[in-house]
Amino acid sequence: MMPRFFFAVPFVSLIIYVSAMADLRNAREIKMDQDNNQHLFTVLCADHCRSDCVTYITPLNACYSAHQLFPDSDSWSEYDILDKIESEGGTSSFFLRYFFSSTNGTCQGNATDYFDLPLAECVGPFGPPRPWGNFSLTEKSKEFAEA
């Protein structure tokens, strides 16, 4: 009679292999995004994307703390964010914004919430002080936005 744990060893190896492949795939996605230098250009406004607007440029496919990137802005929460572009047939029409309970730019743990947000459309309301926003892709990095 075979011991019961005989099949557990290959199964554990398979889990480790699949997990490592997922990490590698995620690393490739982030590297590809950094090579392309694509970022999310955000315009937040007080009145349906028409007045009292401010702009931000944030990374794609990489965790960030908007509170740390823009410490003088009251438009962002303290929680970590991960934005991922979703594309259909090679064109991007919306992105997923994930929120995490971590506050240091690490996106630790599972996402606590997420939203599907369209690109190139005024959407909202989010919350004060600028509840309306418009999102688009840009090749420029954060340093260019602050210049």
Image (cartoon, rainbow, N blue to C red):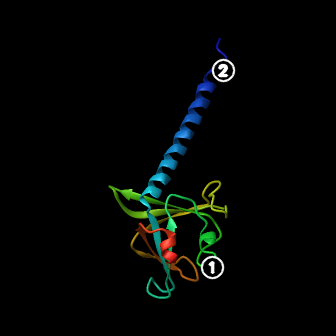
Q: Report x, y in % for residue 46.
A: 51, 85
Q: Which residue is mark 2?
A: 4
Residue type (three-letter) at the residue carrying disc 2: Arg
Classify the position of the N terminus by image quarter.
top right
Of the two numbered discs 1 and 2 in the rendering, the one whose residue sits closer to the viewer? 1
Q: Is residue 15 left or right of residue 31?
A: right
User: Which label sits on residue 26?
Assistant: none
In the image, residue 85 sits, relative to residue 25, either above or below, namely: below
Camera sees residue 57 = no
Q: Residue at x 54, y 82 (%)?
A: 130
At x 44%, y 56%, the residue is 35
Give the CA distance from mark 1 to mark 2: 60 Å
For residue 72, above or below residue 3: below
The structure residue drawn at horizontal position 35% and vertical position 57%, both measured from the top left corner, is 88
Question: Going from the N terminus, do you reach mark 1 or mark 2 first?
Answer: 2
> Quadrant of the rendered structure where residue 14 is?
top right
Determine which residue is flagged by label 1.
Answer: 72
As drawn, the residue found furthest toward the top would be: 1
Farthest left residue?
Answer: 89
Residue type of the residue flagged with mark 1:
Asp
Q: Nearer the viewer, residue 117 or 62?
A: 62
* Whether residue 41 is situated above or below residue 37 in the rendered picture: below
Q: Position of residue 31 (x, y in %)?
A: 48, 52
The percent position of residue 111, horizontal first and vertical second, equals 60, 58
